[in-house]
Image: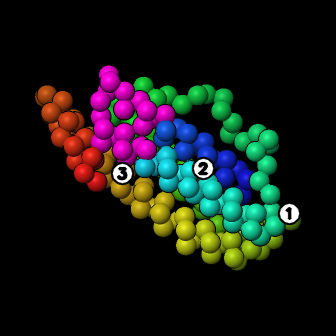
Amino acid sequence: MQDYIQLQLKKSYEYLLLATHFNSYQMNRPGFQKLYQGLSDRAFDDTIALIKQVTRRGGAVDFSKPHDKGVANPPEVHLNELESLARALDNEKELTLGAIHVHTSATHGTTASREHDPEMAHYLQENFLSKQSASVRKLSGYANDLSKLVSVREPSLSVYLFDEFLQKQ
């Protein structure tokens, strides 16, 4: 659970960096900024909810312990629109796999140190797995649509209209 909480926090930070990048005067993509700001806020809120769930049950979260994956390579934020959607989709898939791993551990008690924990499994299933799968589906649809839009000879208008679409979501 500790690693998943830190992963959520890390992805929140990465989304915040992407939102800032697309909000700059060079990029000026308010729709993409809104999308990534929303993903960042959701990941941060999920982190807080997980911390509350763990501490409510008598556990503790230790942020002084380094995350398994670490921050060896800082995230690349100077991406174009399609690359950023691909990165966001990869992030959401990673978060989904992390939630599935924690859910499986809570359901089956895979190691001697982890016990069968049906309440945590239910909490994750109700509050995370459905949101994560919906987010993966939405982002994969966006990436698919944008990849078709940028395949035209002059894609700048297509990207602008797609950004306008994202603003209205």
Q: Tell me the amino acid under the disc marked 1.
A: Ser
Q: CA distance from mark 3 to mark 1?
A: 37 Å
Task: Name the front one of labels 3 and 2.
Answer: 2
Residues drawn in magenta = 17-37
Q: Secondary structure at mark 1?
A: loop
Alpha carbon separation for disc pair 3 and 2: 20 Å
Q: Main secondary structure of the magenta part?
A: helix
Distance (Cα) linking label 1 and label 2: 23 Å
Q: On the image, numbered disc 2 is attached to which residue?
A: 8
For residue 57, above or below residue 82: below
**How is the structure coloured here?**
rainbow
The relative height of residue 25 versus residue 160 in the rendered view (above or below) is above
Q: Is residue 105 visible?
A: no
* Residue 80 horizontal/vertical position (percent): 34, 29
- Residue 145 in the image: x percent, y percent? 25, 47
Q: Is residue 93 magenta?
A: no
User: Would you name the residue on which mark 3 appears?
Assistant: 140
Q: Amino acid at mark 2?
A: Gln
Which of the two discs, 1 and 2, sits closer to the camera?
Answer: 2
**Amino acid marked by disc 3:** Ser
Q: Residue at x 45, y 49 (%)?
A: 39
